[in-house]
Image: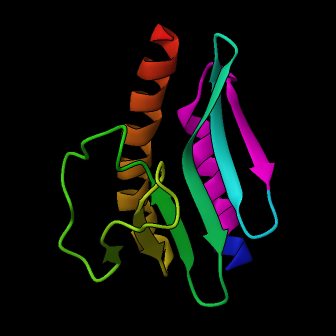
């Protein structure tokens, strides 16, 4: 899964052309954050697990354009109120759809913190 994470990470970093993105490694996950106007907010958390990668994107800040009918989707999680929609990546073919969701979260967070 580490190789899959490296591919995913490089694609996430490409989303931010302004160099406002930071990655914070925490005990169990990586938090991808956006900074603007002295406000820092996560737009995706990435948990590298043994057999899959779990992504958590915002369910409170954004309305995702669609919910792919996929076995990879899980409903809202109560673990983290700001990043509550979970999606699992099991293979490299899942990255494209994951990026579609991550870009929405990134753009929404960017728009929100640019206003603050």
Query: x, y percentage for residue 31?
Result: 67, 51
State the count of labels.
0
Does 69 sit above or below residue 15? below
Q: Position of residue 58 (x, y in %)?
A: 42, 48
Q: Residue 6: percent from the left, percent from the top?
A: 70, 62
Residue 10 on the magenta segment: yes
Which residue of the protein is positioned furthest toward the bottom in this rendering? 51
Q: How is the image coloured?
A: rainbow
Instruction: Give the left or right position of residue 112, taking residue 11 as reference.
Output: left
Q: Residue at x 64, y 38 (%)?
A: 33
Q: Residue at x 42, y 19 (%)?
A: 111
The residue segment tinted magenta is 4-25
Q: Is residue 50 above or below residue 63?
A: below
Above or below, 6 against 35 in this view is below
The quadrant in which residue 104 appears is: top left
| Screen quadrant of the N terminus | bottom right
Closer-to-camera residue (43/39): 39
**Which corner quadrant of the image does residue 29 belong to?**
bottom right
Does the segment drawn in magenta span residue 28?
Answer: no
Comparing 80 with 104, the one in front is: 80
Q: Residue at x 65, y 54 (%)?
A: 9
The structure residue drawn at horizontal position 71% and vertical position 57%, both measured from the top left corner, is 30
């Amino acid at each position: 899964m580490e190789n899959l994470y490296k591919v995913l990470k490089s694609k996430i970093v490409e989303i931010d052309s302004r160099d406002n993105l930071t990655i914070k490694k925490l005990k169990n996950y990586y938090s991808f954050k956006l900074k603007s106007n002295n406000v820092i907010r996560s737009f995706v958390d990435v948990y590298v697990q043994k057999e899959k990668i779990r992504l958590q994107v915002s369910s409170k800040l954004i309305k995702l354009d669609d919910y792919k009918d996929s076995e990879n989707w899980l409903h809202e999680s109560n673990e983290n109120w700001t990043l509550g929609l979970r999606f699992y990546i099991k293979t490299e073919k899942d990255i494209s759809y994951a990026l579609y969701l991550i870009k929405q979260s990134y753009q929404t967070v960017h728009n929100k913190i640019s206003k603050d």
